Image (cartoon, rainbow, N blue to C red):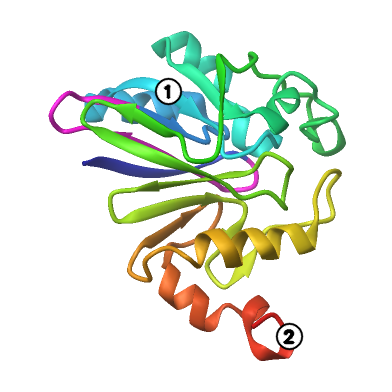
Amino acid sequence: MIFETLVVGNVFTNCYIIGCKNTNDGVVIDPGGHPDRILDVIERLGVRPIYIINTHGHADHIEANREVQEATGAQILIHASDGPMLTDPEKNLSVFFGPAIDSPPADRSVAEGEVIEFGRMGLQVLHTPGHSPGGISLVGDGCVFTGDALFAGSIGRTDFPGASHDQLIDSIRTKLFALDASLKVYSGHGPESTIGWEKGHNPFFNESYGLF
């Protein structure tokens, strides 16, 4: 697997570039800013992006969608419930924190259980709402990309429109914590972790919170 992480944008979003070693077909997950840097890495790695995958529709995860799509021809994928955020600066929250950001609309939506294939690789979609209605996680070869659902030692914010703390907790418990403990967790912000470590140590899931 070809793999590189870039930290981009004003709130230090993790953008992931993944490619198939056999075909060089690949995906860009959450291009949240600095399109020139993202495109430079794509060129250096020799990856041909087939898809741009947004784990959810907030501005800090979609900011460079347009530039990356125009440069590569990659299709934009997002869960249908977050699709309207792409083209609406109020729904993606950008107008409340800085310049208005709009993305091209999604080329198609993705849903629970779907496998996004590129080359000889695939990422399985888990619908993990709570931070946003259409938040998704992506399970790949030994890893899971959790967007802003699960972080190392924390969870996503639930004070935004359409968010739900109870729904996010349920998404993590029933979907992410059901995965193999050895899977590496690559989240939307911050360092990597593992499912096992988060299940055993994440403070939002210890006994003091009454969630286990």
Using the image, tell me which numbered label, if any, was put on residue 51.
1
Q: Is residue 202 above or below residue 178?
A: below
Q: Going by the image, does 153 lie left or right of 28?
A: right
* Residue denoted by label 2: 210
- SS for tag 2? loop
Q: Quadrant of the N terminus?
A: top left
Q: Quadrant of the C terminus?
A: bottom right
Residue 165 seen:
yes
Give the residue displayed 64% in from the left and 43% down from the top. Answer: 135
Which region is colored magenta?
10-26
Q: Is residue 16 one of those drawn in magenta?
A: yes
Give the residue displayed 63% in from the left and 85% down from the top. Answer: 206
- SS for tag 1? strand
* The residue positioned farthest toward the left in the image shown: 22
Tell me residue 67's x, y (percent).
53, 16
Q: Quadrant of residue 74?
A: top left
User: Disc 1 or 2, which lies upstream in sequence?
Assistant: 1
